[in-house]
Image (tube, grey):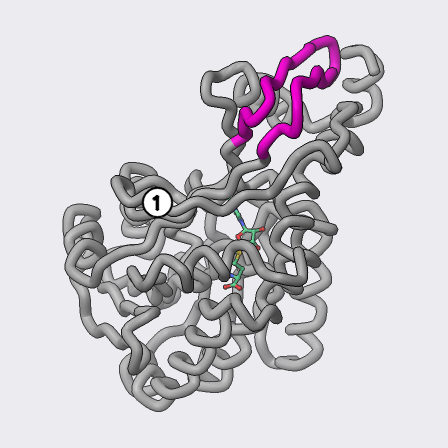
Amino acid sequence: MSNAVLKSAGVDQVFLSEVIAGLSNAPKALSPKWFYDQRGSQLFEQITQQPEYYPTRTEIELLASISAELGDQLSDREALIEYGSGSSRKTRLLLRALPQLQQYLPMDVSAEFLRGAADGLSKQFPKLHVRPVVGDFNSTVKLPATVQSMTRLGFFPGSTIGNLPPSAACSFLRLRREELGRGGKLLIGVDLRKPVEVLLAAYDDSAGVTAAFNRNLLLRINRELGGDFDPDRFDHQARWNDDHGRIEMHLVSRGLQRVRIDNHCFEFADGESIHSENSHKYRLGEFKLLARVSGWEVVSQWTDPQQWFAIFLLG
Ligand SMILES: C[S@@+](CC[C@H](N)C(=O)[O-])C[C@H]1O[C@@H](n2cnc3c(N)ncnc32)[C@H](O)[C@@H]1O
């Protein structure tokens, strides 16, 4: 497809320019936010059901076990703003613990999936005003005036903060500090360090769902940007990077190949990878320090019995 055709076909120019820039870099890398079209969001939900993927069930169990405490500590909150809300599955637990909430603003880049999740939630909680926001959580969210006059709670579960490098995680936390206001609070889920074999299995499940999720990025580039990736010629790989304390996901080229996107041509050497995601695993002290330098204090913290996952209430 030519540039003119792409423009007239309503192509997301930001997606196109980031893909071109990311594949022109050495090493090649793309932002994980591009995983999440409708298909990507569905695949992520399937990942959360895999036996190897401990984060979702661990965080849900932890949230359920602290729901009475959350109810007490957050009984004055009127508006809930969730970043990267996806299916809003965990939100349901929070909404039951905080029945006084009046407004819920789920925010996500995956527009169609977000609307479906918001509709489901409106039906289940008819008294709650649900206002989905399509957008990137790396920028400020313009809150409606009614919400600005309310006591606000931000919610950022799923250890999505781990997808950001520490400097970007710090910027994210500073943005929320401004947006949620002086008395604002932020409830955040953070995945912790644990044995490497547990981590590697979680990001490379035996049913191949995470591999399909990773390859969907190539299929999305083909669908939306007219690329000609052959996803079967890229292997999914999860790697532990000990220096950075993170799991990395890669798409590794099987053999020498050339890929065209728009008017650009990219060469891949045998074994060359596209670095498609980071998932940082924090130590408790590291995250507390990050929160503090980003303008927050830790009000409460909870972990599961194995200390695999933490939930922090920041204020
Ligand atoms: C790891 S999933 C977590 C989903 C859900 N919060 C949970 O805990 O299961 C990350 C979510 O954040 C969304 N997302 C990723 N990058 C984003 C960005 N830059 N801005 C807004 N949403 C984003 C994705 O669409 C996805 O729903």
Q: Which residue is mark 1?
A: 172
Say above or below: 242 vs 274: below
**Residue 151, image x and y in percent?**
35, 67
Q: Is residue 156 visible?
A: no
**Residue 251, image x and y in percent?**
58, 36
290 on left or right of 220: left
Say above or below: 232 vs 180: above
Q: Which residues are magenta?
A: 252-274
Q: Main SS type for the magenta part? A: strand
Would residue 259 be counted in the magenta stretch?
yes
Q: Quadrant of residue 160?
A: bottom left
299 on left or right of 22: left
- What residue appears at the point 35 percent right and 49 percent down from the top-left corner? 280
Would residue 216 be counted in the magenta stretch?
no
- Looking at the image, which is closer to me, 176 or 148? 176
The residue most toward the bottom is 68
What is the total number of numbered labels drawn onto the structure image? Answer: 1
Quarter placement of the C terminus: bottom left
Q: Quadrant of residue 226?
A: top right
- What residue appears at the point 34 percent right and 67 percent down from the top-left corner? 187
- Looking at the image, which is closer to me, 108 or 22? 22
Say above or below: 148 vs 269: below
**Residue 11, image x and y in percent?**
74, 26
**Residue 121, image x and y in percent?**
64, 73
Mark 1, other Cα within 10 Å: few <14 / some 14–19 / many ≥20 = some
135 on left or right of 243: right
- What residue appears at the point 38 percent right and 52 percent down from the top-left corner? 161
- What residue appears at the point 60 percent right and 43 percent down from the top-left corner? 236
